[in-house]
Amino acid sequence: MHNQYLTRVLAGVIVASALIACSVPARPADLPAAKSAVAEPLGPGDSLGRMTLTTGSDEAISIWTICRPATSLNAVAQTECQVPGKSLAIGPTTASLAEAANGTSWEQLQWTLLLDDRPVDLEAFGTFNFRQSHKGPAGRDAYYTYPAWDVVIVQPTVGRHTLRAAVQGLDQSADAAGDGVTEWVINFTVQ
């Protein structure tokens, strides 16, 4: 009988201890650090792994010239390409939007850029004049200048990376479907 009494008391103490332990919040120092739901945007001088972002697109190889993603108004265009391990200009440009823009000025467009799922602070990098050749009206190559974001990856790391660029604010005809966002996804492999 004495054994049963001790067993019940001991079980009660264990249950009470468990209830108290579960109801007392842990100290903040005991909790794992929560990751921010939204990563801080990358700016000039910031690194992503061993890659550093900077400006100077006019001295770098343009990923937009190498990979040449298609442009479909109000749609997502995806492309795969291989790029050299040299400085890469990754800032989006209006070069492929000349016809789709219908006279929309650069200032009216809202741009976003993500590199390996990290947002890039485009305003911090500023813009430059991107030169690209196209067939002119007379059928000869002519150079055109387009605004572009001045974002460069210095020492891109070997392997696969993803660049996502999107623009919103292009003029649309009244019957155009979609949400007004034109997006490019460039999966590029640095050799």
Image: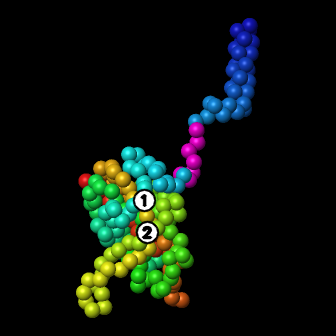
Q: Residue at x 57, y 51 (%)?
A: 37
Tag 2: Cα neighbours inside 10 Å, few (<14), some, or many (≥20)? Answer: some
Residue reaching furthest top?
2
User: Label 1, label 2: how many angstroms apart (C-alpha)?
Assistant: 9 Å
Q: Residue at x 38, y 63 (%)?
A: 57
Q: Residue at x 25, y 89 (%)?
A: 139
**Is residue 37 shown in magenta?**
yes
Question: Coloured how?
Answer: rainbow
- Name the residue type under label 2: Phe
Provide the major secondary structure of the magenta segment: loop
**Is residue 133 shown in magenta?**
no
- Sequence-first tag of 1 and 2: 1
What residue would you read off at disc 2? 128
Q: Residue at x 71, y 15 (%)?
A: 10
Secondary structure beneath disc 2?
A: strand
Q: Is residue 79 above or below residue 29?
A: below
Q: Position of residue 122 (x, y in %)?
A: 50, 63
- Residue 40 is left or right of residue 53, and the answer is right
Secondary structure beneath disc 1?
A: loop
Q: Which residues are magenta?
A: 33-39
Q: Position of residue 190 (x, y in %)?
A: 29, 55
- Name the residue type under label 1: Thr
Is residue 176 visible in the rendered image? The answer is: no
Are the residues flagged by discs 1 and 2 in contact, CB closer than 8 Å? yes
- Residue 124 is left or right of residue 136, and the answer is right
Q: Toward the viewer: 68 or 7? A: 68
What residue would you read off at disc 1? 55
Q: Toward the viewer: 18 or 134? A: 134
Tag 1: Cα neighbours inside 10 Å, few (<14), some, or many (≥20)? Answer: many
